[in-house]
């Protein structure tokens, strides 16, 4: 399946558009009071630079403690009206002195709305779309689409699809900091679907060898290692066995064990087994039985949500 609207994705444009329509950006309303509780649901996003299970290691000379968080990559169908309303409302409440009446804009404040084009060298970042860096002092709850808590860290990776809840907050004024503005803190995360993992990883054998169809080799038995007879004969009806003799010319006084025909076929001019071959009454041990090759399913590649 081809995705054209976002880089490094295989879920398809239709799924992204339908999911964005089903779960748009929206304010979360308290069911008891009917009032906005301060949290905003993002709609579908992809996670990048995620540190959701543990915060990153502190940087040299870093004054504040590292935080949990992730970069959220928004789709072309994300409506930022609600985010902008909350952003400007908080700017007016906490930074009124930074408002320029001439331009009608706030100056000197860091905006949370970043261009994905600024990090286009990284996997998944798509020019023309918006991303936001969202952090939390505390580990945010992480659940799957059935509300089950996710504790397996392999389920959360750069490129996975999620729906998050965010809350606007101001920073850098009390106490005064060189960098100030309004950001959106990460409240919770719901993982909703798999996609291409940013930064590569092990290739999928099912894709690497798609269309390869080769016959398994015929392995000839090692006559030198055939044990002396005495083992019970194979049970009747076992597929792959022929009548006694298996196509090998019979020698007087010698009883040959049935030989799987897919394993060994005597060549031209064969009239007797090599000297020293003992009598056997069981299938030749050690024979290789070709089977269809299967690959274990990687839980990280579960694409059942596309069905």
Image (tube, rainbow, N blue to C red):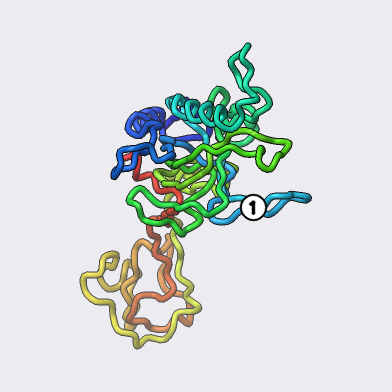
Dividing the image into 4 quarters, which one contains the N terminus?
Answer: top left
Judging by the rendered image, the residue that carries numbered circle 1 is 56
Q: Measured from the top left, where is residue 171 in percent x and y?
A: 62, 39
Location of residue 32 by image quarter: top left
Residue 142: % across, % down: 44, 52
Badge 1 marks a residue whose secondary structure is loop
107 relative to 246 in the view: left or right: right
Q: Residues within 10 Å of mark 1 (few under 14, many from 20)?
A: some
Drawn side of residue 31 relative to residue 227, left or right: left
Q: Residue at x 44, y 30 (%)?
A: 2
Residue plotted at (77% across, 51% down)? 60
Q: Position of residue 166 (x, y in %)?
A: 48, 40
Q: Residue at x 40, y 60 (%)?
A: 290
**Residue 61: x, y in percent?**
78, 50
Residue nearer the viewer, 175 or 242: 175
Q: Check the image and report above or below for 22 versus 56.
A: above
Task: Look at the image and tell me whether residue 243 can be seen.
Answer: yes
Q: Quadrant of the C terminus?
A: top left
Q: Residue furthest top?
A: 102
Quadrant housing residue 291: bottom left
**In this orientation, which residue lies closer to the viewer: 294 or 99?**
99
């Amino acid at each position: 399946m081809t995705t054209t609207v976002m880089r490094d994705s295989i879920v398809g444009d239709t799924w992204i558009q339908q999911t964005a329509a089903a779960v748009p950006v929206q304010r979360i309303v308290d069911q008891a009071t009917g009032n906005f509780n301060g949290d905003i649901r993002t709609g579908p996003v992809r996670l990048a630079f995620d540190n959701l299970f543990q915060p990153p290691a502190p940087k040299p000379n870093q004054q504040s403690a590292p935080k949990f968080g992730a970069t959220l990559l928004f789709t072309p169908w994300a409506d930022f009206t609600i985010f902008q309303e909350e952003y400007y409302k908080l700017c007016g409440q906490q930074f009124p002195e930074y408002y320029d009446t001439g331009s009608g804009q706030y100056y000197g404040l860091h905006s949370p709305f970043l261009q994905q084009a600024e990090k286009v060298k990284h996997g998944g970042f798509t020019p023309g779309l918006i991303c936001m860096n969202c952090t939390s002092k505390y580990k945010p709850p992480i659940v799957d689409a059935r509300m089950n808590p996710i504790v397996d860290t392999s389920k959360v990776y750069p490129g996975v699809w999620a729906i998050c809840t965010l809350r606007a907050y101001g920073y850098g004024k009390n106490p005064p900091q060189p960098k100030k503005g309004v950001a959106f803190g990460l409240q919770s995360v719901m993982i909703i679907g798999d996609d291409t993992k940013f930064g590569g990883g092990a290739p999928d054998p099912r894709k690497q060898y798609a269309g390869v169809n080769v016959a398994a080799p015929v392995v000839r038995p090692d006559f030198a290692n055939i044990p002396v007879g005495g083992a019970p004969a194979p049970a009747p009806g076992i597929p792959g066995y022929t009548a006694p003799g298996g196509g090998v010319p019979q020698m007087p006084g010698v009883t040959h064990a049935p030989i799987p025909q897919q394993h060994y076929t005597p060549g031209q001019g064969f009239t007797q087994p090599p000297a020293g071959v003992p009598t056997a009454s069981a299938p030749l041990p050690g024979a290789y039985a070709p089977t269809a090759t299967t690959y274990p399913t990687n839980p990280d590649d579960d694409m059942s949500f596309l069905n």
